[in-house]
Amino acid sequence: MATYNKRGGKRYNSRKRVSNKEIIESTTAEVFETLDTGASKSEQFVSKYQIPIISVVVLITISVFFYLAYDSFILNPKKKDAVTELNQAQYYFNLALNNEDPKDLFKNAINGAGGKFGFLDIIENYEKTPSSNLAIFSVGMSYLNLKDYNKVIQYLKDFNSDDVLLSSIAKGVLGDAYLQVGDQKNALLSYEEAFGVAENNFTTPKYLYKAGLLSIRLGENKTASKYFKKIKNSFPNSKEAEFIDIQIAKVE
């Protein structure tokens, strides 16, 4: 009986081990079959759409390459050349500001002299560089000093800069030019844009005051009062605040 039980026990355990092995093999087979099916579907997808996929990858690669090449070999050297040319034009501009007869110097700054570029040449030849943007601002200021107000409007009406002070001055100068050609509505809008760029102690009270005076001329006394009171309350130490109480009394 003991021998029979041992044999029987061995046969029972052997069948159990075979059963577990079969389960494991069956499960493994199902997993690989699933993987094969997934891989097959992926291959079918890639095979079906390989031309569009490759085209997109190639396009992205080419775009990145050309951007890096343009930035490294064209834009950066162009920026350096533009700075050199701008320095010379700016030199004439600075001389003009400190000269009793600045007309010819402003013209040299605008058009160039001595074989060097002026602001207009820089705008044309170095488009989309920081120097070109500064040249637009400087040419507008040059034309303002030459009293060519239509040219000021032409160059400064679309001027933009990350420098808030520069942007504010450009809008204010644009307002002055509009006022000189008799366009009071756009002059006021420009002054409002000028003091609205970003509050500072230099340009904000200056263009608030100009906007207030122009508002009086346009019969908008309430608007003028608002602008004058803004100067009184927010910029009491500014030059414009010295006689601001008189202006407030005029419109109230």
Image (tube, grey):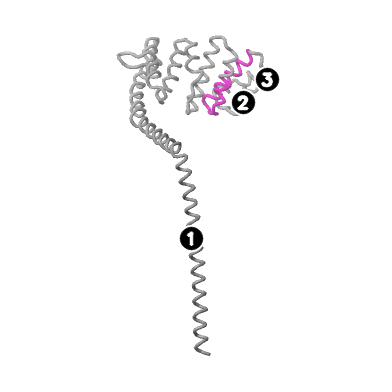
Q: Secondary structure at mark 2?
A: helix
Q: Is residue 35 above or below residue 53?
A: below
Q: Which residues are magenta?
A: 191-217
Q: Residues within 10 Å of mark 1 (few under 14, many from 20)?
A: few
Q: Is label 3 or label 1 in front? A: 1
Task: Give the alpha-carbon distance from disc 2 to disc 1, as whole Å.
Answer: 81 Å
**Which disc number belongs to residue 173?**
none
Task: Give the alpha-carbon distance from disc 3 to disc 2, as whole Å.
Answer: 12 Å
Q: Is label 2 or label 1 in front? A: 1
What type is the residue that disc 3 sits on? Answer: Lys
Q: Residues within 10 Å of mark 3 (few under 14, many from 20)?
A: some
The percent coordinates of residue 235 (x first, y second) are 57, 27
What type is the residue that disc 2 sits on? Answer: Lys
Q: Cβ–Cβ below 8 Å for labels 3 and 1?
A: no
Q: Secondary structure at mark 3?
A: helix
Q: Nearer the viewer, residue 181 or 243?
A: 181
Q: Mark 2 — residue?
A: 230
Residue drawn at the location 54% of the way across and 26% of the way down: 197
Which of the 4 quarters of the picture holds residue 184?
top right
What type is the residue that disc 1 sits on? Answer: Ala
Q: Earlier in the sequence, mark 2 or mark 1?
A: 1
Q: Earlier in the sequence, mark 3 or mark 1?
A: 1
- Residue that lies at the very extreme toward the bottom in this rendered image: 1
Q: Mark 3 — residue?
A: 222
**Which disc number belongs to residue 29?**
1
Dominant SS type (magenta): helix
Which of the 4 quarters of the picture holds residue 250?
top right
Q: Residues within 10 Å of mark 2 (few under 14, many from 20)?
A: some
